[in-house]
Amino acid sequence: MSVSDAEMKEVFDLIDKDKDGNLTAAELGTALRAVGQNPTETELQQIAQSVGGKCNFQSFKGKVTQLSQSGGGESELRDAFSVFDRNGDGYVAVAEMKHVLTTICEKLAPAEADELLKDADPDGDGQINIEEFIQMLTAK
């Protein structure tokens, strides 16, 4: 997800509750997630530490850029996928993934799940390959 400077500024200003031009560590996590990043708690602590507990807009913008370019999401996707890859062969059944997408967390409608999974199983064999799935989700 590419975010413009104006969108980052809007998010920053909305989340800066005391309007002092700085985000607290807690606000920083909320702001990063609002612009499409998903830092771990450890990453948030490191970021907060690196900016002295307060993050101005320029620092926030730099951290968003840094997180966007780090590509750390791939390992998280692998970890998530491995939960469903019970035998460790790098594949998950389309039917099982559809069940997960339509019943857990932010539930997708069956038609939405079908649309996503159609792209995830290009050869139509009923199996989702981890490498192809990650490539599909991280394609820019």
Image: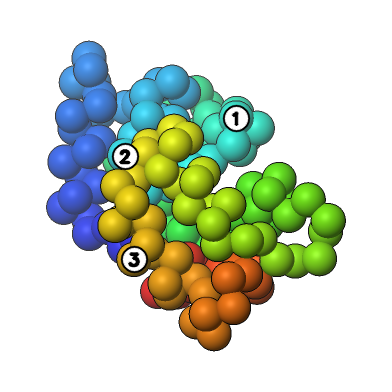
Q: Which mark is residue 115?
A: 3
Give the numbered dot on residue 34: 2
**Residue 59 visible in the current orientation:** no
* Render colour scheme: rainbow
In the rendered view, does 33 fall on the left or right side of 41? left
Q: What is the x, y in percent for residue 43? A: 61, 38
- In three-dimensional space, the C-alpha distance between marks 2 and 3, rounded to whole angstroms, equals 25 Å
Label 1 belongs to which residue? 41
* Residue depicted at 49% across the width and 71% down the height: 120
Q: Amino acid at mark 2?
A: Ala
Please, is residue 8 above or below residue 27 in the view? below
Callout 1: helix, strand or loop?
helix
Name the image quarter holding the C terminus: bottom left
Q: Are marks 2 and 3 in contact (CB under 8 Å)?
A: no
Of tags 2 and 3, the one toward the viewer is 3
Quarter of the image with the N terminus in it: bottom left
Ranked by sequence position, the earlier of labels 3 and 1 is 1
Residue that appears at 20% across and 44% down: 9
Residue 45 spot, x, y in % from top left: 60, 28
**How many numbered discs?**
3
Query: Residue 59 occupies which quadrant of the picture?
Result: top left
